Amino acid sequence: MNRELTKQELHNLAMNIVGKDLEAKGYEFIAINSQLKKQPQFVCINKKSQRFFVIVKAVEISETPIIYDVVWMETFKNHARKNNAKVIFAGIGLGASHDKTKAPFLHDEYLLQYDGLQLLDVELN
């Protein structure tokens, strides 16, 4: 029986998409956390051994870019600074192939909105 993906399954799908992008760009994973509402989802390093905290946000597809909560992100940036890390945000919009306002179905094609990895400035303003 086909059913809509659960929130956890949507989150895992978004993480897989971002994880493949990070790998393709040469990042090496130190830690992965797939629990909903636990940040960051990925801790990784680049070829220069710079640490990155990667936040993945899975949402419904929209006509506008996927954004993050600016106030919450400032708190997270403080955490990154304390750990000598940079922050990458990856917003993923997912929708059913037959209706983008519905969640994708298990074992079915889906629509994807992904603008890539967004490096956020963690330096103090």
Image: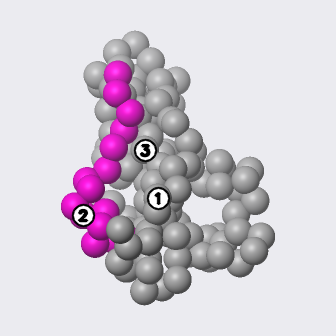
Q: Judging from the image, what secondary structure is the residue with disc 1 in? A: strand
The N terminus lies in which quarter of the figure?
Answer: top left
> In this orientation, which residue lies closer to the viewer: 61 or 48?
48
Q: Position of residue 112 (x, y in %)?
A: 49, 29
Q: Position of residue 12 (x, y in %)?
A: 46, 51
Looking at the image, residue 79 sits to the left or right of residue 27; the answer is left
Give the quarter of the image for residue 96. Answer: top left
Amino acid type at mark 1: Leu
Mark 2 / mark 3, whichever is N-terminal: 2
Question: Which residue, given by chain and number where applicable, does mark 3 sit on?
Answer: 91
Question: Which residue, given by chain and number where applicable, does mark 2 sit on?
Answer: 72
Looking at the image, residue 76 sits to the left or right of residue 48; the answer is left
Mark 1 / mark 2, whichever is N-terminal: 2
Mark 3 / mark 1, whichever is N-terminal: 3
Q: CA distance from mark 2 to mark 3?
A: 15 Å
The C terminus lies in which quarter of the figure?
Answer: bottom left
Furthest residue toward left: 71
Q: Which mark is residue 120?
A: 1
Disc 1 versus disc 2: nearer the observer:
1
Above-or-below relation of 96 to 70: above
| Labels 2 and 3 touching (C-beta < 8 A) | no
Give the quarter of the image for residue 22. Answer: bottom right
